[in-house]
Image: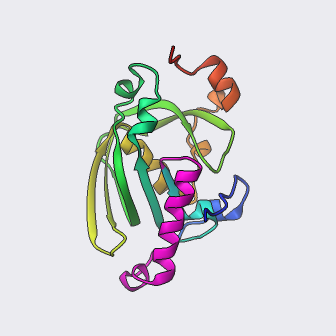
Amino acid sequence: MAMKIVQAGDPALREKTRELTVEEIGSESVQKLIGLMFETMYEAPGVGLAAPQVGVSLAIAVIEDKQEYIDKMAAGQAAQRRRSAVAPHVLINPRLTIETPATEEFFEGCLSVAGFTAVVPRALRVRVDALNERGEPVAIDAEGWYARILQHEIDHLNGHLYIDRMNSRTFTTRENFERFHAPRTD
């Protein structure tokens, strides 16, 4: 059963999350939360979900960018954004390192700012050191759209939303994005 995604204005989205111990990660309650977070992300649908987005102040995020989402994009858009499928995985207590000062700007949305989008600059390449759902250390080197997803979800764990980083003059409803800015698929 999917959880409710909290929206901008909910205090849970503005708090720095608490890190988990390896013992906590293996607990039944945390494992159940991770499963529910995946279910919630899939139902939304989205490519990432952080625990604060379901009102839980723990340093956990789930990510998966499905090929079926990419296949629905306009011709050339996936290549322009350097977007490719990302297998499902869990990040716990992640540490983000920006690998290059270079950034790219693209429209970005958020399940907790439903109905809106804006252009957000993000680093092109990042490294994330974290624990997985078994409490094992993982290191991720990512670039392009995957790097953007990681930055977005880790921002949530630090109490930030994309609207804190956006180019405010580009903030628009999803409807107007589709009308004026979305690449055409026909």
Q: Can residue 91 be seen at all in this image of the molecule?
A: yes
Image vertical order of residue 87 relative to residue 138, above or below: above
Q: Residue furthest top?
A: 186
Image vertical order of residue 21 relative to residue 17, above or below: below
Coloring applied to the structure: rainbow
The x, y position of residue 141, in whole percent, is 26, 50
Residue 38 on the magenta span: yes
Residue at 48% over, 53% down: 153
- Quarter where residue 109 is shown: top right
Residue at 38% over, 20% down: 76
Image vertical order of residue 106 relative to residue 28, above or below: above
Q: Judge left or right: residue 183 versus residue 112.
A: left
For the N terminus, the image quarter is bottom right
Q: What is the number of callouts on the image?
A: 0
Residue at 58% over, 37% down: 166
Which region is colored magenta?
18-47
The x, y position of residue 30, in whole percent, is 48, 77
Image vertical order of residue 5 relative to residue 163, above or below: below
Residue at 34% over, 46% down: 86
The x, y position of residue 108, in whole percent, is 54, 37
Q: Judge left or right: residue 37 versus residue 84.
A: right
Q: Residue furthest right?
A: 9
Q: Main secondary structure of the magenta part?
A: helix
Q: Can residue 18 be seen at all in this image of the molecule?
A: no
